[in-house]
Amino acid sequence: MEPTFASLASAIDATWVMVAAILVILMQAGFALLEAGSTRMKNAGHVAGKTVLTFGLCTLAFWALGFGLTFGNGNEFIGLGGFFFDPSGENAADSFSNAFAADIPISLFFLFQLAFAAVSLAIAWGGFAERAKLSIYVIFSFLFTIVIYPVIGHWVWGGGWLAELGMQDFAGSTVVHLQGAVAALAATILLKPRIGKYNRDGSSNPIPGHNQVYTVLGLILLWIGWFGFNAGSTLGSTSGFFAYVALTTNLGAAAGAVAAMAIAWSVTGKADIPTMLNGVIAALVAITASCAFVEPWAAVVIGSVSGILTYFTAIWFDRKGIDDPVYAFSVHGVAGIWGTLSTGFFATPELVEQAGVGAPGLFYGGGWHQLGVQALGLVGSLLYVFIVSYVILAALKATIGLRVTEEEEVIGLDLSEHGGYGYPELLPAEHISSFKRNGSHSLTR
């Protein structure tokens, strides 16, 4: 059979989505470097290694139940089919007719959406950093991917009640980033601060990360991966719309970098690099919802506001005694809220028509309707994720415990959880051998 224009276009679209899926999966490397660099050396191997473990766990859980719950045919609240996904099965795509309309293989759609679920889970781990047991990562990976993420995913992207209302979240400011951030916040509250973070008078002690170069490299990988995240969400390339989405994404990120650096410099007199990096990620989070709906100038505004919001909210949460080691809620949560609301202001009639979701924003004659839909979706999503995350983690805390012992935390999770050290040349070999023989007390006598 000779290729037709339609078959060639479909193949090109599928190739682009495959590339985009790979870029989003590569973001796991960005999270590993960013989180490892932002935490202390004694936990570096643990932080990086658990990224691989939890991606594997998320893959299995999403294949078994998560994909069907998110995109399977069901009701307004949850999918009820397509479990233990098998694209070779007869009429496999029929189980996903409510959500799947792209001209790409259903197996590729699964891979692309799996990458998104894994990113949301990776964001959640920021609130667990440097003090949670490895067993909690294992249990929560499964429960987040099955009980938490699919519900909001179905509401917004799977034909659920928010989809019917026309909520605009093109690539997941709420579905991906806010969910992960809210789960991180629940964990941070229940785990309590790291040892030495706060003094008796409530004042905060800085606990800087051990490798700023790692954080910069991690940020660059995330920035690159975001082109797959946002532009890949067009689920095709032949229309050319993916290029426009890539443009607004990059403009937002650039504005976030400059705005965050400028605000830190003006407030403290120092051009703080971690603040700039957080500004970039916050801007990328915010533009994720709106990248297909707003004009370039609005993308710059959205990114700039994100960088500034993240700076001040990170300080506020720290002063309130919430020890968020990588500022997960400020960067992904607050920016996710702003980004989701932004389409209610800036969505243009032309882009709304092209994206095919919702209505124009307030500044383009759409009135308050779309802003109200966005706000309703945010409140519903935030409440569901926080309550369910808190209940799950509170139950785990009451049974098996969330946190390693004080002694294990002081030693570091590399040794206490894995029996090895991320930087073994910096620790005498006899200490590691003694630890493996006698346990954590052998290093703290």
Image (tube, helix red, strand yellow):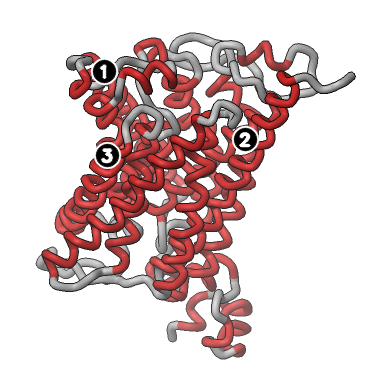
Assign a secondary structure to mark 2: helix
What residue is disc 3 on?
A: 297
CA distance for labels 2 and 3: 27 Å
Type of amino acid under label 3: Trp
**Which is more N-terminal, label 2 or label 1?**
2
Residue at the spot 45% in from the left edge and 24% down from the top edge: 151
Type of amino acid under label 2: Val
Label 1 vs label 3, nearer the camera:
3
Assign a secondary structure to mark 1: helix
- Give residue 223's position: percent from left, percent from top: 45, 52
Camera-nearest residue between 160 and 239: 239
What residue is disc 1 on?
A: 370
Residue at the spot 19% in from the left edge and 73% down from the top edge: 270
Camera-nearest residue between 402 and 105: 105
Number of marks in picture? 3
Type of amino acid under label 1: Gln
Disc 1 and disc 3 in contact, CB within 8 angstroms: no
**Which is more N-terminal, label 3 or label 2?**
2
Residue at the spot 42% in from the left edge and 26% down from the top edge: 152
- Give residue 130's position: percent from left, percent from top: 41, 63
Q: Quadrant of the image for the C terminus?
A: bottom left
Circle 2: is it few (<14), some (14-19), or many (20+) Cα within 10 Å? Answer: many
Residue 8 seen from this side = yes
Q: Is residue 239 left or right of residue 331?
A: right
Circle 3: is it few (<14), some (14-19), or many (20+) Cα within 10 Å? Answer: few
CA distance for labels 1 and 2: 29 Å
Residue 283 drawn above or below residue 167? below
What residue is disc 2 on?
A: 17
Residue 409 drawn above or below residue 78? below
